[in-house]
Image (cartoon, rainbow, N blue to C red):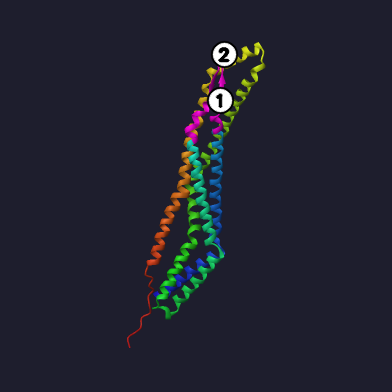
């Protein structure tokens, strides 16, 4: 009875696996979640590159003032130089994350494709045959075929299973932090653009002052003297932007490193352990007893 029950349990399990593999139920979720994660990585990479661009503009923008008629040039955007290095490193992290997700999608395409699914189906049906046929009870081929079936099943569902686990972890623990950090970086990018534009307009006004009248010259000197007192506003705004950029980039690096690097490595380690166990396990089903003659 135990022998027959074990065989039916294995048969039902293998049959369920073949249905899932051929109807690609799990694969649809795997592709959907992988595409969503890849899209997030590419969007964040674009945000990082856009932020890098506006910081580069800020670093090259000078603010000219003439307190008491003495010309002085400031480059307050240089305060963003350390942050720009962090942004460039962040861009490489995002590119690595996008590459990791691209590899996962490629593996999902390979293992969910018709050739691999057909191979799994043939080997699994062969395993059921040797499982039920009593003539293979003592044959070495029986154990080899059953192990090969288990090995192919693990390969077939590893990537979609990881996609489900990864997206579930993101939805439960990282989504809110990711959205806040991304929106904050986009807002900071717009703020830096506004500061850059204000500085650029001021520089254009200084260039256009070559043909001004005496009254205009006096007004410009007065305005420059006032601006020299308020020059700290540029620096304060850049400092605030730098502080916010550093915090949000660190948050995003943590999210993507965990989701696209650490989790895949941990999952891969678990799969390798499972494959090793599958290839070395002694699969023994109870054999029918024969009474002594």
Q: In the visual, does 268 lie left or right of 119?
A: left
Please identify the residue farthest to the bottom as the structure is shown.
293
Determine whether 72 is above or below 266 in the image: above
Q: Identify the mark nearer the N-term, 2 or 1.
A: 1
Position of the N terminus, as image quadrant, is bottom left
In the rendered image, residue 138, in percent from the top left (x then y), is placed at 38, 78
Determine whether 272 is above or below 13 in the image: above
Residue 32 visible somewhere in the drawing: yes
Q: Secondary structure at mark 1?
A: loop
The residue to which callout 2 is attached is: 69
Which mark identifies residue 62?
1
Magenta residue check for 72: yes
Residue shown at 60% from the left, 26% from the top: 200
Sort mark 1 into few (<14), some (14-19) or many (20+) by Cα contacts within 10 Å: some
Residue shown at 41% from the left, 59% from the top: 272
Please identify the residue farthest to the left as the structure is shown.
292
In the rendered image, residue 83, in percent from the top left (x then y), is placed at 48, 34
Residue 237 visible somewhere in the drawing: no
How many callouts does the rendering have?
2
Residue shown at 47% from the left, 44% from the top: 255
Determine whether 32 is above or below 78 in the image: below
Magenta range is 56-84
Magenta residue check for 211: no
Determine whether 142 is above or below 33 in the image: below
In the rendered image, residue 87, in percent from the top left (x then y), is placed at 50, 38
Q: CA distance from mark 2 to mark 1?
A: 18 Å
Q: Secondary structure at mark 2?
A: helix
Residue sitting nearer the eye, 64 or 271: 64
Residue sitting nearer the eye, 214 or 107: 214
Position of the C terminus, as image quadrant, is bottom left
């Amino acid at each position: 009875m135990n022998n027959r029950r074990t065989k039916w349990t294995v048969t039902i399990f293998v049959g369920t696996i073949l249905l899932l593999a051929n109807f690609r139920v799990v694969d649809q979720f795997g592709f959907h979640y992988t595409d969503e994660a890849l899209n997030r990585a590419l969007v964040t990479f674009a945000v990082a590159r856009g932020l890098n661009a506006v910081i580069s503009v800020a670093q090259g923008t000078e603010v000219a003032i003439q307190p008491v008629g003495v010309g002085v040039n400031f480059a307050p955007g240089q305060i963003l130089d350390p942050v720009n290095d962090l942004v460039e490193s962040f861009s490489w992290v995002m590119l690595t994350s996008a590459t990791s997700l691209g590899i996962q999608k490629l593996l999902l395409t390979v293992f969910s494709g018709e050739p691999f699914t057909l191979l799994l189906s043939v080997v699994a049906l062969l395993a059921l045959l040797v499982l039920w046929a009593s003539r293979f009870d003592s044959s070495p081929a029986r154990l080899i075929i059953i192990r090969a079936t288990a090995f192919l099943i693990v390969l077939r569902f590893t990537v979609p299973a990881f996609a489900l686990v990864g997206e579930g972890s993101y939805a439960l623990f990282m989504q809110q932090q990711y959205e806040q950090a991304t929106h904050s970086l986009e807002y900071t990018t717009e703020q830096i653009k506004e500061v850059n534009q204000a500085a650029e307009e001021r520089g254009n006004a200084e260039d256009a002052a070559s043909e001004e009248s005496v009254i205009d010259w006096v007004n410009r000197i007065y305005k420059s003297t006032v601006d020299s007192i308020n020059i700290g506003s540029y620096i304060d705004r850049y400092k605030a932007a730098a502080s916010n950029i550093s915090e949000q980039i660190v948050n995003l690096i943590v999210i993507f490193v965990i989701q696209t690097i650490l989790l895949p490595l941990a999952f891969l380690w678990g799969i390798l352990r499972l494959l090793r166990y599958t290839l070395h396990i002694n699969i023994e089903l109870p054999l029918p007893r024969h009474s002594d003659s």
